Amino acid sequence: MKTDDPLLSRARVLFEDLHRHPELSWNEHRTSGKVREFLVAHGVTVQDSQASPGLIVDIDGGTPGNRVFLRGDMDALPIEEETDLPYSSTKTGVMHACGHDFHTTTLATIAAYLHQHRDELAGSFRLAFQPAEEIQPSGAEAMVKNGEADGFDAFVALHCDPLIPLGQVGYRHGPINAAVDTLMIKIIGQGGHGSRPHLAVDPVRIGCLLVTELHHLVGREVSAHDPTVLTMTVFHAGDAHNIIPDEAALKGTLRSYSPGPRAEMKQAIHRVCEGVAHAHGAKIQVDLRDGHSNVINDPTLVHMLEESVRDSYGNDALFEMPVPTLGGDDFACYGEKGPQLLFRLGVGDPKAKPEDLHSPRFIARPEALPIGFQVLSKVAIRAGAGVKSP
């Protein structure tokens, strides 16, 4: 497909509309409505997903082949946008800071294309417009649980990456995303007057010690050859300058690639929390919740990706990532059902300092839409054993 194709022009209009009107997880009702309008206008039949407000499109090719599942996530983040885009968010405190508007638009464009060319293709395709990637329980968990991901031979998706320049496609053999676990800690001390801390058990002081000790675990409890990250991100305690509160609450995230270090870090977190609390006379509650596992790319699908990128953009467009990202993605849930591929699409400006995902200044450059469409659609067609690529 040429970059001036009318379908891509209409896709850009959809992208800008979705970016102006972001919606948080499990509330993507307007988003799914706009996607439905776009698809129906192109003659595509749309079904409601049991993971509401998600949508599902099923397209059968003209000849038998593999069943391919493509995912596009729809939710935004609770972040106030700080870009100067002419189509920046109109919703206070909500923005598409992770590129899900880009993912959704790309998938909608592919759905329209596959529908138009279905008689030329082999295999069948399910395009899932998934809600709630950013939270748990997530949309992928729901789609897997209700059977909407059963019976597929391949699961494929892309993810925007502003740290990769426009025109390049990032990929890895094996793990590309980390396993993600959530840590929640409640420190129960004894409140008192700020002038007499010796008569209290100060949960603020204990919380400060805990943050320091927990951050020291990385590189001490597990090998530096197994990348692991533990980051404490929330600390809530008290509301007055002269009162020692009874309790403090901390939250954080554990990211890991390997099952061994993941288990070792969990044991160490419990040990350190209980030890610090006991040493300072406090009680403690530690809730360490298992999150999504790793996204692990299938070698055959990676080969299809390499071929697809070379066909359209040459070998120089391929960027083999030296290490996996420590970001997580609920796309890992689909890996429980069959071979999967997640690749990173460069949307960064090579002339400017990139703003990372989840930044209020993040921008997914719309010039990357044709590239995302071209690569993802070609991989899908190859995976379905198609006879003609776009």
Image: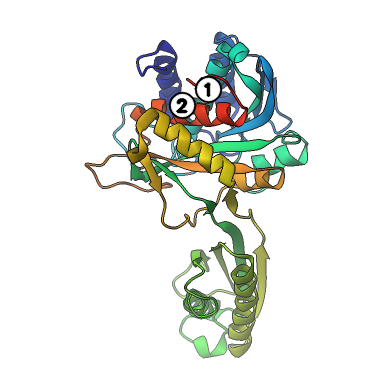
Front position in the image: 268 or 206:
268
Query: How many residues crowd around disc 2 within 10 Å: few (fewer than 14), some, or many (20 or more)?
Result: many
Return the residue at label 2: 373
Return the residue at label 1: 110
Q: How many marks?
A: 2
Tell whether 128 sits left or right of 228: right
Front position in the image: 14 or 61:
61
Kindly check if marks 2 and 1 are in contact, taking CB atoms under 8 A apart as contact: yes
- Residue at 59% x, 73% y is 265
Q: CA distance from mark 2 to mark 1?
A: 6 Å
- Report whether residue 139 is seen: yes
Going by the numbered disc 1, the residue's amino acid type is Ile
Callout 2: SS: helix
Q: Is 218 placed above or below 297 here?
A: below
- Residue at 26% x, 47% y is 353
Going by the numbered disc 2, the residue's amino acid type is Phe
Callout 1: SS: helix
Q: Is 362 placed above or below 380 here?
A: below
Residue found farthest to the right: 146
- Residue at 48% x, 27% y is 106
The quadrant the N terminus occupies is top left
Tell whether 124 sits left or right of 179: right
